[in-house]
Amino acid sequence: MPLLKIDHQELEVAAGSQVLEAALAAGIEIPHYCYHPALSVVGSCRMCIVEVEGMPKLQTACSTPIGELPADRKVDGKYDMVVHTESEKVVAARKLMLEFLLLNHPLDCPVCDQAGECFLQDYSFKYGSAHSRFIEEKRVRPAEDLGSGVAINHDRCIMCTRCVRFTREITGTDELFVMDRGYSNRIAVFDGLPLDNPLAGNVADICPVGALLLKDYMHTTRVWHLSHTESVCNECASGCSITVDARDNKIYRIISRENPQANGYFICDYGRYSFHKYADSPLTRPLQRTKDGWEMIDWDTAYRQVLEQVQATGGKGAVRALASPTFPNEPNFVLGQFMARLSDRKNIALLPTLKEDDQEFPGGFRISGEKGGNLRGVQAMVPGLAAAMKSLMRGEPGVLIALDGDGRAHLTGELKRLLELVAFKVVVASMPSDLTAQADLVLPVATPYAREGTMTNDKGLVQWLQPALHPAGEVRPDWQVIAELGQLLTGEGHLYTCAGDVTWKINQTTPGYSQITRFRLGRTGQLSGSEAA
Amino acid sequence: MKRYQPILTKYLDEPGSATIDFYLVHEGYRAARKAILEMDAGEIIEEVKASGLQGRGGAGFPAGVKWDFIPKNSKKPTYLINNADESEPGTFKDRLLMNHNPHQMLEGMIIASKAIGCHLAFIYIRGEFVKEARLLETAIAECRANNILGKGIFGSDYNLEIVVHRGAGAYICGEETGLIESLEGKRGWPRIKPPFPAIEGYLKSPTVVNNVETLCNLPHILNEGAAWFRKIGASKESPGPKLYCLSGGVQKPGVYEAPLGTLLETLIYDFAGGIADGRELKAVIPGGSSAPLLKADEIEGLKMDFPSVKAAGSMLGSAGIIVLDDTVDMVQACYNLARFYAHESCGQCTPCREGTTWLTKILARFTAGQGRLEDLDLILEVTDNIGGLIDFSQGSFGKTICPFGEAVAWPVRAFVEKFRAEFEAYLPREALA
Amino acid sequence: MSFAFDAPRTKRFKALVRQYPDRRSLALPLLHMAQDQEGHISRDVLLALAEMLKISPAELFDTVSFYSMFNLEPKGKYLLQVCQTLSCSLAGADLVVDHIGAKFKLKPGETTADGRFTLLKVECLGSCGTAPVVQINDDYYEKMTVDKVGRVLEKLS
Ligand SMILES: Cc1cc2nc3c(=O)[nH]c(=O)nc-3n(C[C@H](O)[C@H](O)[C@H](O)COP(=O)(O)O)c2cc1C
Ligand code: SF4
Ligand code: SF4
Ligand code: SF4
Ligand code: FES
């Protein structure tokens, strides 16, 4: 393996890797714009220039491959390449490159949504010069709507073509292109064929400056006011890593979080904008169905109701349960636990959720058609969990305890029959849904982005779901509500004080989860073992 | 010394020189026949290497050496592209070569194709040359009818097709990787190198790009031998016949064939009849607009070959010699070229896209009498930031993907450095105070 | 209104498909053919050609807009392109532009009201030895003077 020296650091790198790649992997910053690890290398912004010993021209780090030198030609007797990223020449050249990039920039950071996370702003602060020598008329072009909720402010664009390469290489949809030539170059869409693909929002994430912006987020807040919560999208079984940006207990946006084991660099627009559906009228108190609608009740009353109904309708043996793949592992695990106690898990089945075809993109990104994001997790949490509800149809009509599907439940004929058959329906839910519409009693739990626990995607990757919001009203954590119901019905106390306690129990008892702990999951998760184990 | 007999343009004045009948009578495709029937690829490459033929498109790279970079036994097809984009201002020789003797060039293409194992070759001709493109199509059809192109040419088992491909108005498509992108049906944005075209060129296959004039030399090298070729011209390092394009303030502008190493003064005063209208020589751009200009006193004894012009601080380039007489306004001339480059920058890399227009805007302001004294240094700095300092001894320090950056930086810089007084004369009086 | 090649051009298209090793490389040849037939490259042309080339219209527009010879808007019957780069400029190209401009009351870039003439200033046409040069449609008119260009235009008007 070639030995590279960057500034004062020695690195062993894979032959053929580029200087920039190697530097970034080692945590060495080399400013760059056009390079993006998921996209082809074009070497056009010229920002990543470095000095390579033995080469008279400055080289672009993104497109300078490191090879192995024969023993007698090694630099200083041992290095295959020696790179300086902060030499006088480099620093000067970088400053000038920034000057070029800012020539026509409107310098409108005070009103720009990218401010605070703009690489132009960052780099000019670090490497640039304070004033421009450009006194000519600036190039001014109106902002434009590109479609799919993305707008472009041409004057801020630095022509790195990341966005164009994204629609060519990642989505394969080819909507964006460079129009005209030279100084007139600009990003455009073809008349009548706007940006239109389910990954479109990513172009705003990868735009290194404030040229591409999401209309959804535009002018709503400033980035430095936001809290950033690292979490997981649960809208489908791909389980993408995300960052949820919130302020005053309100989500402003969701962006992708890099995770090579899960989503790579991107997320889809369903996931990106999913927080909106959970923002309106979440449930805040237990609700009981009355003759003329719903009545708010307190938790004690609610639990008392459940117990009375169980006694009145066939007893504990007749309690049925539905585990839900839109909820984390923890509530499902606890549900499985107490249903084992009540009826040896004969009366628990899987809530059917919506299924579509997988959507695969040329760049490798996949939106799973399985809308129950934690399907694989639920199956591991409740051994022998049946997808069919046949066993639940037998015996006396009793009480049904169902975890809701967060609007993604699939009301199959079988499920409808079950709902008709049971005598009393308890739905544990965060939002009104087609399932709660049929409930007799609704127990409110946190909305998806206020939940905590683990999720297992369809590749078996377990990630930690971090709550970005505090639940409102009398909402309780999902695992707690299930545990309390279990306590009520089994008469045995539970020892869980937080979601992590349940995770620990899962670790102790669930095949394939012996490596899964809160600590080990870290930021990017951990693969669960094979379910057969 | 015996008077030089033109080689590449020897039939210039003969009627019908563009037809295959004429060519068959006079040259007979002898060299191509020999290359196909009697020589193997390695022998052709060796012969051309031995001749010392340097590319005539601008960079002067040895043709045989370039061919040798093509991987032998590659599984992918190999392509030859004849660069007939002729877009460097001041250059107009390839058009002449195509117009008056297209078969000489086609014969060169057959030889080069055999050398690199190519069975499909392209002529990338600038879009404006509509008539030339038609003429070439006709010449190719003539060849196919005579078993000189197509399947099993000259009765061998060698197949070769040549396709004429028209550009569409973009100077940068003369740069070989911009050209390849353009041939692939894309915008002509030059590629980062490596990989070089010899490894990954057209459709990611090994590709050689050669200039029209380079190719036109090949039949003569095979016919007369490498040793004969080496002896033409002033220096064995840089030998062969050369077409020089003279334009600007000379009596008789035009294309003149003379050996490499001919004195620039001979070209200007003997061939082109001297400076027009009894004016004085002020400066010369010796190798197309990208070459830094030389002042009248810098051209004395200057031999026009690749190494000599380089040593004089400029380059032979495409041998597009633009003569500037003493009536030329250097500020206007500099602005004219800067504007050309700003218009033609492909816009891919930051310094060139932004810098060329910045220079043009400053110079426009200058010509409008609104220059500032500090602008002169600013111009020099901006050129450095695009193309790096001119230091031929140390190589260039360009900061761009392709040499276009240097091609604009160097000439603009030379104008300002060498004729600073004229720029200062454009300053408004306040600026000088 | 949709676009299709006429019969001879369709034949030519089929021949080109056989000549080239890949489809997208036909972009420039097809664009030239379409512009020849239609006078300019309209949206319909782009949509039809993109399909023939098996690329998206966006990618084709990316290509088209790069090249100065492709007209995205209709141009006059005669396209008068006067070279303005150094050698032509030294030889008096501006006088030629001014003359044409005055004759037709045109500024560079404009087309006469009757749609017959469009005046353009263009960059180096590769004919500096016979400067100044005016390209009118496919033909070069070399060593132009105000008188000569006047006579050429006379013949066209
Ligand atoms: C900006 C630019 C423009 C060029 N234009 C031309 C051209 O019009 N014709 C040409 O033959 N070479 C041109 N070249 C040089 C080509 O890149 C390439 O070196 C040449 O075609 C190789 O052929 P040769 O080795 O036979 O000279 C240009 C290079 C640059 C950087
Ligand atoms: S819009 Fe953004 S991502 Fe696209 S080219 Fe411009 S700066 Fe790059
Ligand atoms: S692919 Fe699935 S998990 Fe990823 S962001 Fe989209 S909906 Fe969420
Ligand atoms: S130097 Fe200029 S012409 Fe060459 S690639 Fe960069 S922007 Fe394009
Ligand atoms: S990141 Fe290397 S040139 Fe842009």
Image (cartoon, coloured by chain):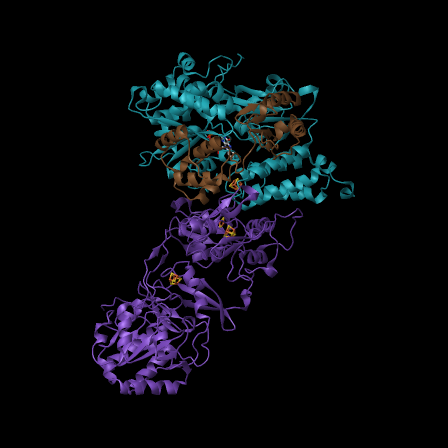
Chain colours: A purple, B cyan, C brown
> Closest to the observer: A32 or A207?
A207
The correct choice, above or below, for B21 with respect to A122 in the image is above
The x and y percentages for residue A187 are 51, 48
**Is A354 placed left or right of C29 in the picture?**
left
The correct choice, above or below, for B129 with respect to B398 in the image is above
> Closest to the observer: A87 or A158?
A158
Please give the name of the residue rendered at 24% of the width and 77% of the height, measured from the top-left corner.
Answer: A347
**Is A287 placed left or right of A220 in the picture?**
left
The x and y percentages for residue A424 are 30, 81
Is residue B201 among the parts visible in the rendering? no
> Closest to the observer: B405 or A428?
A428
Q: Which quarter shows the C terminus of chain A?
A: bottom left
Please give the name of the residue rendered at 31% of the width and 87% of the height, measured from the top-left corner.
Answer: A308
The x and y percentages for residue B161 are 36, 27
Q: How many marks?
A: 0
The x and y percentages for residue A20 are 46, 52
The correct choice, above or below, for B131 with respect to A263 in the image is above
The correct choice, above or below, for A292 with respect to A160 in the image is below
Is residue C152 among the parts visible in the rendering? yes
Determine the image quadrant of residue A236: bottom left
